Amino acid sequence: MAENVLELTDSNFEAEVIKSDKPVLVDFWAEWCQPCRMLGPTIEKLAKDYAGKVKVGKVDTDANRDVSMRYGISAIPTVILFKDGKVANKFVGLRQEKEFKEVLDAAG
């Protein structure tokens, strides 16, 4: 896991995401998912670019089924921006960095 990217799990999701005082960008992914792997460097760059303003984390959907089911993750990669503990934006599929930056700049 990259330096600024949190590893989110069923057990720490509530504390790290729902109770966060900052917006949180969460990447739902799996090791076997090729588009997820292609999105990885973008997520890591966003984590670095927005360090201190936005928390960025990844949820391995295979290992953390409770959180994945709670948010209806049926296709990966899915990236959700949480603000004040609620879903603010949801992206399904491989997206470009500028799409994430637009919502992160608006959320900041």
Image: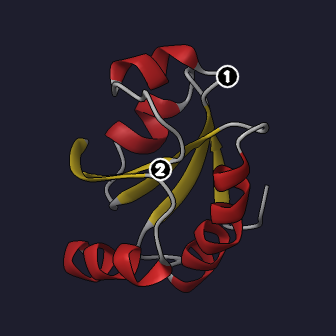
Rendering coords of residue 98 (x, y %): 41, 84
Label disc, if present, on residue 26 of the rendered structure: 2
Rendering coords of residue 20 (x, y %): 36, 49
Judge whether 97 appears above or below 12 on screen. below
Q: What is the quadrant of residue 71 in the picture?
A: top left
Residue at x 57%, y 21% (from the top left corner):
11
Which color mode does the image show? secondary structure
Closest to the camera, between mark 2 and mark 1, is 1
Count of all numbered marks drawn on residues in the image? 2
Rendering coords of residue 59 (x, y %): 59, 38
Query: Label 2 vs label 1: CA separation?
Result: 15 Å
Q: What is the quadrant of residue 46 in the picture?
A: bottom right
User: Observer-nearest residue: 51 or 96?
Assistant: 96
Query: In this image, 102 relative to 50: left or right?
Result: left
Among the two numbered marks 2 and 1 on one chain, the one whose residue lies closer to the N terminus = 2
Please name the amino acid that badge 1 sits on: Asp
Query: In this image, 15 relative to 51: left or right?
Result: left
Residue at x 34%, y 24% (from the top left corner):
72
- The reply to whether dot 2 and dot 1 touch (C-beta < 8 Å) is no
- Image quadrant holding the C terminus, namely bottom left
Judge whether 98 appears above or below 107 on screen. below
The residue where tag 1 is placed is 62
